[in-house]
Amino acid sequence: MINKINWNDAIFFFDVDDTLIDTFSNSLVASDVISDVLTKEVDRNTSKLITERFKHFFRLLANGHWSNGSVNVEHEKVMARITELQRPVIELYGSIRKWSREVLLTVAAEDFNCNLSDSLIYDAVDKYWEKLASLSTPKQGVLALFAEIKKHNRPIYLVTGSDARLRRNTEGLFTYDPVESEKFKINRMELLKDNGISFDGVSIGDPEDKPHVDFFQKAINMVQEKSNSQIDNKNIIMFGDSYLADLQTPKEKLFFGLVVLFHEGQDKSIEESERYISTGDLYSSLTYLV
Ligand SMILES: [Mg+2]
């Protein structure tokens, strides 16, 4: 039995990628622009092979993100390589930025003995993000859900991880400027408004990223500052596509009122445990408001 949340108090937190928009499948489409850029330094065939490897690694990371902590040997190996390249990030911020496309492209190129120049990596990744941003249409049901929330005059916040725009240093390792990275993602989020996804605020995982408690606390602090009042976490509903990344901390450490796992294709909503449901239809979560 799940306690309902009062519409008058409800505050909505949304993960963005693969919750509101199709980042995974569109990322595979957007990756194809990388190949053309690489031909400035690498022959066409190798460019294609590197791009396919980049997509393969991205799929591995996404599957790890959606798993419930189960280990895949190849995933672990790629993560070890990413971790090694991000030593400076760990030293400064305590953890790696898993989703850095710059690092993923570097690792993919290494497999074909290619050491791409810094400027080529940045150019390829810029073009990839540009293409991906142009493909950011809302998932089915998202606009209806947002319209219903707005009809009740309740606030919507995007609470989203870092895009991790990393830069390579002279030792060939990657470093991180959280301010630059955050600015980049805020701009990407602003573009969503052109597609009908309107929101009251956005909190980005730079430098504290999910699932760390500080990442979610940063979002709560933002809401409190904006509303100039103390908020009660039991009025927050958090939506995400990964239990481990998006929902576990809000549920177990911050005691949000409800966490909603979006699971593409799931035809029934399931009450998983107290304050936790999974669904293939985000709109249906509104039955838990009264
Ligand atoms: Mg997501």
Image (cartoon, rainbow, N blue to C red):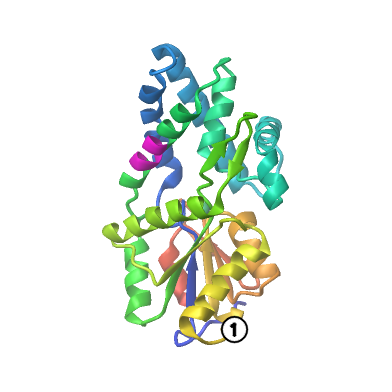
Secondary structure of the magenta portion, mostly?
helix
The answer to which image quadrant residue 247 occupies is bottom right
Is 86 colored magenta in this rendering?
Answer: no
Q: Vertically, is 166 above or below 43?
A: below
Judge whether residue 134 can be spotted in this image: yes
Judge whether residue 135 can be spotted in this image: no
Q: Name the residue at 61% across, 30% down.
A: 170
Q: In the image, residue 99 lies at what x, y percent?
A: 55, 43
Q: In the image, residue 210 lies at what x, y percent?
A: 61, 57
Query: Going by the image, does 251 lie left or right of 280?
Result: right
Q: In the image, residue 161 lies at what x, y percent?
A: 54, 55
Q: Please provide the residue range marked out in magenta.
A: 126-131
Which residue is labeled 1 in the image? Answer: 232
Numbered circles on residues, count:
1
Query: Going by the image, does 78 lie left or right of 50?
Result: right
Q: Name the residue at 53% across, 87% down.
A: 229
Q: Name the residue at 28% across, 57% down.
A: 195
Query: Going by the image, does 98 lie left or right of 33?
Result: right
Nearer to me, 24 or 4: 24
Classed neighbour count for the residue bearing mark 1: other residues with Cα under 10 Å, few (<14), some (14–19), many (≥20): some
The amino acid type of the residue labelled 1 equals Asp
Figure quadrant of the N terminus:
bottom right
Q: In the image, residue 228 lies at what x, y percent?
A: 50, 86
Q: Vertically, is 55 above or below 140?
A: above
Nearer to me, 210 or 122: 122
Is 130 colored magenta in this rendering?
Answer: yes
Query: Going by the image, does 161 lie left or right of 184?
Result: right
